[in-house]
Image (cartoon, rainbow, N blue to C red):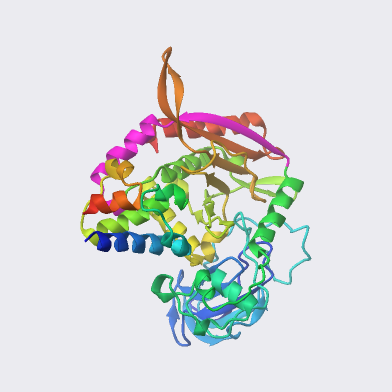
Amino acid sequence: MTEELDALVRRALTEVAPELAPELDDLDPNVDLWRELELDSMDHLSVMTRLSEATGRDIPERDYPKLRSLHAICEYLA
Amino acid sequence: MSDDVATFDYALPSLGADMDVGRIVEWRVAVGDAVSRGDVMAVVETEKSDIDIEIWHDGVVEEFLVDLEEEIPVGTPIVRLTGRGPAEHEPAVPPASPPEPTSPTGASPSPPPAASLVETPARPASAPTARVRSSPRARHLAGERGIDLAGVVGTGPDGAVIAADLDTVAGEAPAPPDRMRSVIAARMERSNREIPHYHLALDVDLTRLDRWLAERNEAAPIAERILPAAAFVRAVALAAATHPELNGHWIEDRLVPATEVNVAMAVSLRRGGLMTPKVEHADRRSVAEIMAELRQHVTAARTGSLKASWMTGATITVTNLGDHGADLVHGVISPPEVALVGIGRPTERPWAVDGSVVVRRIVTVTLAADHRATDGASGSRFLRAMADLLEHPEEL
């Protein structure tokens, strides 16, 4: 389940920022990925939109601060 | 208007003042197709990205006049159409572009439209002959390395070949000359050489804007949420509409105020460089409409599918440093525009309110303006108007 979510998040990131595919492979799941990958607020919104559509879950803005790392996002969606 | 049916030719538009030649890499219409204003006719390859070019009048495609991948000068007729002709609907380009002092006079019959911040020159001859879905960067590198893209497995969107994919087939690769960098260099050099800039800054309290956006976004589905960037563009547009001396172009030693407000927004590209697609008539669009357009622009800029009509005709430019940026920016104006608005990184700061110090989220907004066109007093009024709107978001 977690592996599926991990793949889902990685796919969303790759779709939004295809150039980052190589960096994603080495990404520490516990770091702040937005800062690490220099993703801006528009990228962030695009990724959240994809995750929300893929999982059918609303992701309210107030939860954004919790969703900083790959690990945290997977836990949140699980 | 006459109903006369005539034959007319559609010419390769300039996608920037420094663009002399281009290359059609894909036709999006076929001979016999009926086309209407706004339809994408073809994809033009430039150094920085592929750009969709649109037709500006209705007609029927009669004949293609150039071959795919052929390098052709700007102004070359590329498609022959029959229809009522181009007279009624000309593209909404800015007033005549100023002469480009650093480049020889182009052969195009009419002056090309002024470019957004960074122009899009044609690439050197390096395009592969087979058309494979691929990123501009990948094509550029493939040309330099002599790799046929048709033989590369793509890992990008829809299987597109991206630069990283080339590493799986390439051996030793020479460092590619960064053409986009040199385009930006030429542009900025011209700006600093010709434009006597003055710079102003103002701190803006974002408390009310943050609350206003949070309330709207709480009730909105995720796809309709609005980012502060859209509110910034809207505030710039409204301020520009009431301060025409900062919304226009410096042409032949005088200010030509624009009749429209088209706000270009700098979008940085991850592989380096930036593009500046515009939000047309941003003073007449709601914040939600601007947001939808910004989303579209950012995606297009980063996937190389910008439309030519977005890249020309800007009357003022905004650069938004975002959450990872610096606190403020002293911008460099994109000639022939006369102003550039910079939005720094919003940060929590101590802020005096009614005699007490409180913590507020503050953003430093800057204006770089052309001192030939305006003085600091005008610039200050503009910034103040923008700040008032951001601090009273219900007026946006």
Q: Quadrant of the C terminus of chain B?
A: top left
Magenta run includes residue B207:
yes
Q: Nearer the viewer, residue B67 or B79?
A: B67
Magenta run includes residue B38:
no
Residue B300 visible from this viewpoint: no
Residue B49 visible from this viewpoint: yes
Q: Where is residue B381 in the image (x, y as percent from the top left)?
A: 56, 30
**Hey, which residue is sitting farthest top in the picture?**
B355
Q: Nearer the viewer, residue B134 or B153?
A: B153
User: Taking B9 as reference, is A51 above or below it?
Assistant: above
User: Taking B196 as reference, is B74 above or below it?
Assistant: below
Q: Which of B293 and B105 is in front in this view?
A: B293
- Is A72 displayed left or right of B19 in the figure? left
- Is B247 displayed left or right of A35 in the figure? right
Q: How many labels does the image show?
A: 0
Query: Quarter-wise, where is residue B393 in the image?
Result: top left
Q: Position of residue B284 (x, y in %)?
A: 43, 48
User: Taking B77 as reference, is B122 above or below it?
Assistant: above
Q: Where is residue B216 in the image (x, y as percent from the top left)?
A: 29, 41
Magenta stretch, residue numbers: B196-224
Residue under the image location 31 percent in, 51 percent down: A71
Query: Quarter-wise, where is residue B148 in the image?
Result: bottom right
User: Taking B238 as reference, is B101 above or below it?
Assistant: below
Q: Where is residue B264 in the image (x, y as percent from the top left)?
A: 53, 51
Residue under the image location 27 percent in, 62 percent down: A3
